Image (spheres, grey):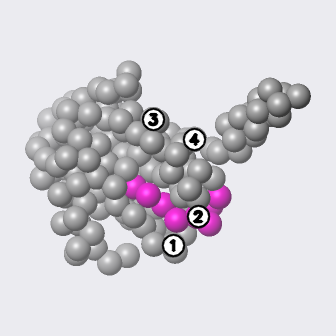
Amino acid sequence: NKIFYFIIGVLLFTFGNAQNNVTFKAKDGLTIYATEYVTNENNPYILLFHQAGYSKGEFKEIAPKLLNLGYNCLAVDLRSGSDVNFVPNETAAEAKRLHLSTTYLDAKQDIEAAIKYVSSKNDKPIILFGSSYSASLALLVGKVTIV
């Protein structure tokens, strides 16, 4: 009986949370790729920015835990990065294909675009969650961005 209820609980959690691949544009026109995890459209968002050489795949295990805490998440592929957890960085690949600069500082506009995208979803406060260089950029952008 306990196993049955556990399986039902896992299935409800799995299908009760939407996970969608989304895109939006940075200021220079680059398409930014992200994975959006939604528990409730009215919940606040945590924006997840990966470390150097990584992708949004860095947050495959973390995002479900944040959902359990009552947040929606947006895991963003920044233009400076590569593959992690078998998840390719689609934004970095697109930037290279278009011969756009992919320095750490160039990723600032990707973070700004993610904030703009999520601010159109609801009016709740937005939390910026960075890893390595993106944490520094998140602090910089968060200090000057008023949505």
**Residue at the spot of label 2:** 43
Residue type, numbered disc 2:
Asn
Residue beneath disc 1: 124
Q: Secondary structure under badge 1?
A: loop
User: Residue 53 appears at what percent x and percent y?
Assistant: 20, 33
At horizontal 71% and vertical 34% (from top left) the residue drawn is 10
Label 3: how many Cα within 10 Å (few below 14, some 14–19, many 20+)? some
Q: Looking at this view, is 95 or 111 the one in front?
A: 111
Q: CA distance from mark 3 to mark 1?
A: 24 Å
Label 3 vs 2, first from the N-terminus: 2
Residue at coordinates 41% horizontally, 45% vertically from top-left? 75
Q: Which of the 4 quarters of the picture holds residue 51?
A: top left
Mark 3 is on which residue type?
A: Lys
Disc 1 marks a residue whose amino acid type is Lys
Q: Which residue is mark 3?
A: 60
Mark 4, residue position: 19
Magenta-drawn segment: 40-47
In the depicted view, which residue is nearer to us: 75 or 114?
A: 75
Quadrant occupied by the N terminus: top right
Report the number of numbered marks: 4
User: How busy is the neighbourhood of tag 4: few (under 14 within 10 Å), some, or many (20 plus)?
Assistant: some
Q: Pointers 1 and 4 in contact (CB under 8 A)?
A: no
The reply to whether residue 140 is visible in this rendering is yes
